[in-house]
Amino acid sequence: DAGITQSPRHKVTETGTPVTLRCHQTENHRYMYWYRQDPGHGLRLIHYSYGVKDTDKGEVSDGYSVSRSKTEDFLLTLESATSSQTSVYFCAISLRASGSTDTQYFGPGTRLTVL
Amino acid sequence: AQSVAQPEDQVNVAEGNPLTVKCTYSVSGNPYLFWYVQYPNRGLQFLLKYITGDNLVKGSYGFEAEFNKSQTSFHLKKPSALVSDSALYFCAVRDGNSGYALNFGKGTSLLVTP
């Protein structure tokens, strides 16, 4: 257990509503990531953060924004949810401060359904 | 771009038999390769990684993986499968351009039957 929690764990919402997912870590690690998991696609990177207020886009960032005002929290926001954003969302952290050889550890996931 | 491919959607094996889950990679430079396992309704659990050195990497739960540079492969193996190994397995490669994020394969579902 790498000390990662995600909230909520499940959410059902309606098209057009804003949604915020939270990732919280207790390990004080620099790098944090948001991925989405869809059948047939594996996991795909949405956004990542390399420090407080330092974020960047991943492969599937359209329709998503992120914020990191504290080291321990990384928020993912869907400004106006669409059905195509129905997915399972995973947060991950790197257990070392930085480096290409780091292992990433994943949170338990948030299952989001957009009706 | 760094990528991996998992050519099999599903692998079936009988308990006690050896298992192999295949992964091939396409990278520029040195590949940093990972295997993760996902049990139903759970997050991903790290199994093992290849960074450099010995081509046979040993990991958690009795799994190992063989790095083969000439075949650009990183297959996951276990000498004797257990029913409890049934899960979804992901191969991944480090992406040097996205904050060291991982690029994942589509996953392989392993079913071990008694």
Image (spheres, coloured by chain):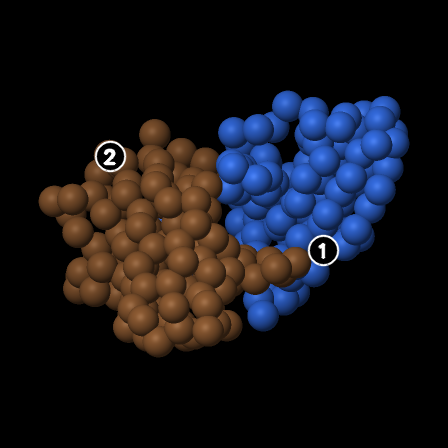
Q: Residue at x 57, y 40 (%)?
A: A39
- A12 up-or-down from A18: above or below: below
Few, some or many C-alpha atoms within 10 Å of disc 2 (few <14, some 14-19, many ≥20)? Answer: few
Q: Residue at x 61, y 28 (%)?
A: A61
- A62 up-or-down from A20: above or below: above
Which chain gets the brown colouring? B
Q: Residue at x 56, y 62 (%)?
A: B39
Which chain gets the blue colouring? A
Residue A45 spot, x, y in % from top left: 54, 37
Query: Which quadrant of the view contains residue A4?
Result: bottom right
Residue B4 spot, x, y in % from top left: 34, 40
Residue A89 spot, x, y in % from top left: 66, 45
Query: Which quadrant of the view contains residue B60?
Result: bottom left
Residue A114 spot, x, y in % from top left: 80, 34
- Residue indicated by mark 2: B28
Give, as a three-letter code, the residue at label 1: Gln
Please indicate, yes or no, whether residue A27 appears anywhere in the rendered image: yes
Give, as a three-letter code, the residue at label 2: Ser
User: Tag 2, which secondary structure?
Assistant: loop
The foreground one among B47 and A54 is: B47
Label of residue A6 in the image: 1
- B9 up-or-down from A60: above or below: below
